[in-house]
């Protein structure tokens, strides 16, 4: 949050990965990592409209056919090298690591490893481990199918 020496916010508005503060004089302040800067002046109603538009712009729906196209592209990969290159191009290193950690958590849960050990081994939060556990037990069946096939290999 912005300090008093910079401004005295009345309202704080949240948007993905940024905090904006609305000042009494009609200014909006951007506050990333303790550095604040004035971005523009708006009245309170204009600020709400702006952030509502921003929120919905970031929440666009992806068409079902585009998701299915992605799944088909993954199924068309023929070996580990192709999969490695595809996912390296598709995802950031952090996103790939996050998926790998969730998959490891699912495998460990299937083996009966306690949550605390899974958290230590993967670095995942307890909330994420619990969510993966819920999906392994009562999800759409994707984890179960993949886990059964992984055991065969």
Image: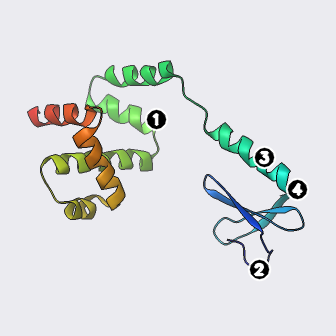
- Residue 126 locus on image (x, y percent): 32, 60
- Residue 67 locus on image (x, y percent): 46, 25
Q: Nearer the viewer, residue 130 or 146?
A: 130
Local packing at callout 3 (Cα closer than 10 Å; few below 14, some 14-19, many 20+) is few
The tag earlier along the polypeptide, 3 or 1, is: 3
Which of the labelled discs sits on residue 90, or is there none?
Answer: 1
Residue occupying image coordinates x 75% and y 64%: 11
Q: CA distance from mark 4 to mark 1?
A: 41 Å
For the rendered model, the colour scheme is: rainbow
Q: Are marks 4 and 1 in contact (CB under 8 Å)?
A: no
Residue occupying image coordinates x 60% and y 38%: 59
Helix, strand or loop at disc 2? loop
- Residue 46 locus on image (x, y percent): 84, 49
The tag earlier along the polypeptide, 3 or 2, is: 2
Read off the residue under disc 2: 4
The tag earlier along the polypeptide, 4 or 1, is: 4
- Classify 52 as above or below 80: below
Q: CA distance from mark 3 to mark 4?
A: 11 Å
Residue occupying image coordinates x 86% and y 68%: 24
Helix, strand or loop at disc 3? helix
User: Hey, which quadrant is residue 69 in on the image?
Assistant: top left
Q: Nearer the viewer, residue 77 or 20?
A: 20
Residue 124 at least partly seen: no
Read off the residue under disc 4: 43
State left or right for residue 51 relative to residue 137.
Answer: right
Q: Nearer the viewer, mark 1 or mark 2?
A: 2
The tag earlier along the polypeptide, 4 or 2, is: 2
Which of the labelled discs sits on residue 50, or is there none?
Answer: 3
Q: Nearer the viewer, residue 30 or 11?
A: 11
Farthest left residue in view? 152
């Amino acid at each position: 949050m912005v300090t008093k020496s910079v401004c005295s916010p009345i309202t704080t508005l949240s948007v993905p990965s940024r905090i904006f503060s609305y000042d009494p004089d009609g200014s909006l302040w951007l506050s990333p990592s303790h550095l604040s800067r004035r971005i523009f002046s708006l009245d309170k109603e204009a600020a709400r409209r702006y952030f509502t538009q921003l929120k919905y712009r970031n929440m666009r729906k992806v068409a079902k056919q585009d998701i299915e196209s992605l799944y088909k592209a993954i199924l068309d990969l023929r070996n580990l090298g192709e999969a490695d290159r595809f996912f390296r191009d598709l995802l950031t290193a952090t996103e790939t690591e996050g998926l790998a950690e969730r998959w490891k958590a699912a495998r460990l849960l299937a083996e009966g490893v306690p949550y605390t050990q899974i958290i230590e081994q993967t670095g995942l939060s307890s909330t994420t481990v619990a969510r993966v556990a819920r999906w392994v037990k009562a999800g759409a069946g994707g984890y179960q199918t993949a886990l059964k096939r992984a055991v065969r290999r």
